[in-house]
Amino acid sequence: MSKSRPTSEASPLATAYLLVGLASVAILGLLLIENGGRWGLVPAMIGAAGLAFHWRSAPLIVLAGIALGQFAPFGPIELSWFSVPEMFPNRAALPSTVASNLAVCTATLVYVIVQYRLIGLSAGLFPPERKRDENPPRSGTAGSAELGTVLFTAAAVSVGTFLLWRLAGAVHRPWGILSMQWRLGVVAWLLVGGLAVAAAVLGHLGWRRLSRDEAAVYLQDGLWHETRGEQRRINRWRAWRLRRH
Amino acid sequence: MLTSRGWWLLLFIIALLAMGGVLVLQAGGFAGGRDSLFLLGLVLALWFAWEWAAFTIRARLAVRNLDLRRDLRDDRGPVKTLWAGQTFTVRGEVRLRGKLSIPHVHINDRPPACAGPVEGSLQFAGPLPAGGLAGWEFRVHCPAPGALRFEGARVRLADLQGFFYFEAFVRRPAVLAVLPKLVDAEARQRATKRFNLLPPPGIHRLRRPGSGSELLDLRDYRPGDPPKRIAWKASARRDKLITRELESEVPIRCTLFVDASDAVRLGPPGENALAGLTTIAATVAQAAAGNRDLVGLAVCDRRTCDYVAPARSPSHTVGLLRRLAKTANLAPATEAAAVGPLVERAYAFASEVYVDLLRPALNRFPAWLPYFSPQPGWTMRRPPAREVWLRIVRTLAWALVTAGIVIGLLGDDPASGSLAGGVVTLGALTLILAYAVWLPWGLLRGHRRRYGWRKKLAAVLAVLYRHPPGALALFLEDDACFAGELQRFLAEHQVPYDVPLYDGRGRYLFARPAKVGVIAKALLRAISRGHDNELYVVMADLLEMDEHLAPLLKAVRVARSRHHTVMLVCPCPTGLPAPSGARADAGDTSERLPPAGLPVADLVRRMAHARADRAWRNVRRAFGRMGVPVLNAKAGDPARLILHRMEQMRAVQGASRG
């Protein structure tokens, strides 16, 4: 029988997560500096500080920093305040080669996963409850296997995404649509369609496993929605009569 | 299902995809590194979608595979029956069946509401592998007779990053009776002056042989005597067969009439008048059973009576204790209770225990319904101030408009025409004002939210109690019916709730005079089945019911005419000092005028005490005329006095039989 074990911040798994996160941030910083100049140092330093101090908003700031470094030189809007040649040379922060790009994406994903996991280990996974005065439960761990699964998932998702992107480009383009636009459209449709199919399948599985009471509530609710007006009229007159007599 | 953490990350991922998409669209036919941002967003989006799918599968499928078991034990081992005043250990464990695992789960057991302080851990937090077991252990104290209801365990799931959250409740309701404390017959009986009763003149106690257990005498064996009665040692000494003669037993039949109406259910569970009455009844039943006396029980409320004929077997005694424990668990209910507070209390409970039945996918409530079709004031027992405002001002407005029209039609001079126009305009403005106040008033108040809760609870209650399909709509419109169902729901789950003591006209709602007739009928029924001189103990709240006591007094008169003994145990009002006979005899000291300058609270308390004293004296006078002693349930030791009376009856019966 397993027992509840509150996990401290200095647990071996947290330390392992921290090391992996720092390594991913280091790789990310090196690749960003190599491509985008000194600006690449900013997301990396914020990421490292976020890992060290468990900042909750650090992953979002890192993502915003990467997006800004990429969007500023190529974006459709000219940002006059952004033209600092020492910080932003006139090239994108993200690399253009597939291998470097894959490494940046994987490192960013690993960093995001690790940062949120560390926050979960220290501050808890559940949203705070206003009505209860109990402390939020902290996360227990599944041991070192958890970290391996996380790294494998990150790598698999990154490689899968790049493969998807490559396959989307290989699909025949009708009507002379530009290749990048066609590729973007295919991926967007795949993403939306996949999510819709997944939601439908999961929803159907959920319906199939309804309990007797849940199914009865659903049927009762459906009947009420269909005949709400008539039932309301009848019962209001009835309630009025009972109240009078 | 998404937490705020998840929403923020999702928002950033969508922003990354949008920005990357813009760059890709700008690129046209050649990427040149402009698809990097989109790819980064796509990587994050796919990973997020993967996590969502995995979490949803676990939330929808794995949670249903959780199997909760509960084990109660004391120092000697597992138990199935609880006893008041004792502490028990509860071991809970959840097993995850199936092949899915849960990366992080927080399980929180819900302790019974009527239990005392809980010691130990009630929760488990951590990963739960497929086939794994999560356990916890705590100790629970049973303060009073009644029942403990275990609902189940609250289960919360989250992914490892805290983006997704799901809450469920594994319901395994179990109601365990908490029986009154076990007492022995000797411990509850008076130690001194045990037989301080002189038999009536002409009656002398004469021991006679019977089939009891105490030795009366030895005599020579006669043919036909049962061999088991032969005293072998005495026979060996005298060299002839000697037979033992045993004393004759004089069992007393006692029937307890317990008032279980709403009048005695008021107050906190375990501390109300009903708890006191059931404790007395349980003590008498156990002690009498120890004396091999026969005990019966009649639990009466305002409509029905649950009668058990006197018997003395151990199973009968345990059955009586179970009935008393079940009775002690009853909660007060009145149809006059306001629906609003009950809905809030019930929804707070149901949102934890019946969270699966309140999900919007199953139990929807149209948000527009309270705006376009709210519950009208004319179906409410107590319309809210908003409805009263609309009704009054609207009536005034229509009166003004009508008056203006009448003036315009009947008036024949120009001045009356302008006056009519002014009055009609004033009426129209009043009508506009009425709705201008009524509409924002409705938007600001919380009745819309409460209306939604009411609909969801109505659906849940209609299903839980297996009502016909139209019950949902009925509960939405009929306040009295829904208030009754809500009280039933709350009482069944041992959730405390407030009930009004007085109606809108200031009348006490819990007097329940109908119970007197039910008790009287039960008493007459017991008398008609009586064998010998019996003891009838009526435990009922009869204060301030002087004009309704006639049926019971009549039944008591019948019992006394047949030489039965009747005792009355009456609980005094909670929160007031016990009325004393000495003070009553001294001549209404409590009814003297209070000193000047007394605070209002003390004044009210003093008046309440005087009123209770007066009611107590009236009851004593009414029953005392027939030789029925009236005991206070909260003062002295009524159980011991009842047992003492049984001993007196035993002595008299033994003497009369001799």
Image (cartoon, rainbow, N blue to C red):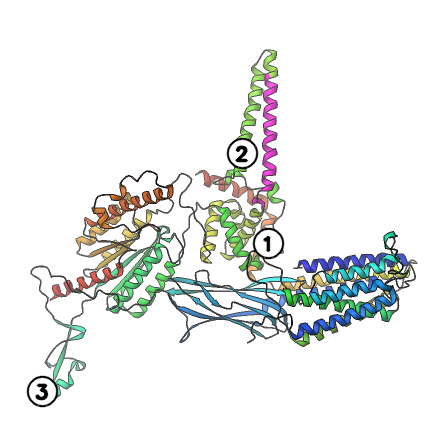
> Residue B38 or B579: which is nearer the viewer?
B579
Please determine whether, in this image, residue B369 is positioned above or below residue A91: above
Tag 2 residue: B389
Q: Amino acid at mark 2?
A: Trp
Residue ID at (49%, 47%): B339
Examine the residues drawn in magenta and state their main secondary structure.
helix
* Magenta residues, start to end: B419-448
Q: Give the mark nearest the N terminus, 1 or 3.
A: 3
Tag 3 residue: B238
Q: Amino acid at mark 3?
A: Arg
As for residue A185 lying within the magenta part, the answer is no
Q: Mark 3 or 2, which is nearer the eye?
A: 2
| Same chain for the residues under marks 1 and 2 in the image | yes
Kindly identify which chain the residue marked by label 1 belongs to: B
> Residue A132 or A224: which is nearer the viewer?
A132
Tag 1 residue: B363
Kindly identify which chain the residue marked by label 3 belongs to: B
Q: Mark 1 or 2, which is nearer the eye?
A: 2
| Same chain for the residues under marks 1 and 3 in the image | yes
